[in-house]
Image (cartoon, rainbow, N blue to C red):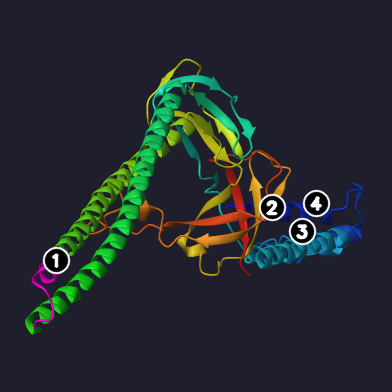
Amino acid sequence: MTRVRRRRELTHRTCLKAIPLDTKPHRTEQDFDNTDESREAPARVRERDTKPDEAGLEKAEASPPQNTGLLSFPKRHPYWTAAIALVFLLIIAGVVIWWLYARQYEWTDDAFIDARTVTVSAEIAGRITEVAVADNQHVQPGGILLRIDDSDYRADLKQADASVAAAQAEIGNATAQIEAQNAKIDAAQRQVAQARAALDFAKAEDQRNRELLAKGTGTQQQAQQASSTLHQDQAAYDSAEANVAAAKSQVSVLQAQTRGADARLEQAKASQDQARTALSRTTITAPVAGRATSISAANGIYAQPGQVLMMFVPDEVWVEANFKETQLDLMRPGQPVDIAVDAYPEKTFHGRVDSIQAGSGTAFSLLPAENATGNYVKVVQRVPVKIVFDKPPDVLLGPGMSVVPTVKVR
């Protein structure tokens, strides 16, 4: 219907164009003669004028309109086109450069400052008399942290010293007696030697007198006198040997006493060392350089053995980074690391990979995962990596502070 309507409108316009507007009302004879021709002329004109328009209309309707705005944009705006193309090239180049740069590094935000914190607790019972540090105060190695009343422990040490002195005196007395007995043994042995010589001489005299008596050249009196002397010398010799044996027996007793005194001395020395150690524990010092924190001790509190009095954080800290197991393929000890600490965003610290834990973090947790239950779901595990600083940080870093380490693996 629309096409027919448009054709009618086009035909009407053509007819209006074919009829001259300045036609005068008067006619000539020639006009009358040409009436038939004049009647047929407008029809032919209408036909001639209408056909081209219909053909154009059909052509216009057959070919849909084309949007040539985007195609003509580069010709009409060459500079804008060049700028857009340059921006696209820069974006592509930036993506390529970023990929080439990013593939050289592995990073994680699951990382924290770590340290071997020390729990400072009382090793002996006693009343605290002095807390020598304040909260978060820095202390050098051997610096005094707190003191416990030492009066009882000093008395125990003095008693132990006295026990040691008594044991040493007992040993000294036994040693002197042994030396005296050794002198007696020496004298008794000399007497034995003399008695032995006299006995040998008496035996020879007795034998000679017996022989003389048997030959008739000796007297009975001389033989009896020689026999008596022999018996006396034998008795003297036996007595000297008995004295030597008695002296040696006394020395054995004294030596046994000395061994007992030595044991008591060792016991007294052990008690002395224990008392000295207990006395030294009344003063608690810093094991290494660090800071005292979380102090719960106060003057006048009675401390029990094992009671936690404060925490001590050493100056030596490192980074414990929990990398995904898929990030460890190219990671090795010694690789450089850039460390960003959340507390100090304007600073970047440098370190290196120290070691990689032999196992995931869950394997050493309090309740390790049990995957043999039939409902196993594979999850990418995290493996702790220890990262140390190239030089001690010049800022305050404590355990638990968040960091972002970036390891250069290529």
Q: Which residue is mark 3?
A: 69
Query: Residue 129 location in percent, x, y?
Result: 51, 19
Q: Are marks 3 and 4 in contact (CB under 8 Å)?
A: no
Of residues 317 and 149, the one nearer the viewer is 149
- Alpha-carbon distance for marks 4 and 1? 203 Å
Q: Residues within 10 Å of mark 1 (few under 14, many from 20)?
A: few
Label 3 or label 4, whichever lies nearer to me, is 3
Label 2 or label 3, whichever lies nearer to me, is 2
Q: Is residue 110 above or below residue 306?
A: below
Which residue occupies 65% across, 65% down?
A: 99
- Alpha-carbon distance for marks 3 and 4? 37 Å
Indicate the amino acid at tag 4.
Leu
Of residues 88 and 159, the one nearer the viewer is 159
Q: Are marks 4 and 1 in contact (CB under 8 Å)?
A: no
Q: Which residue is mark 2?
A: 391
Q: Which one is earlier in the sequence, the residue at label 3 or at label 4?
A: 4
Q: Which residue is mark 1?
A: 225
Q: Is residue 183 magenta?
A: no
> Which structural element holds mark 3?
helix
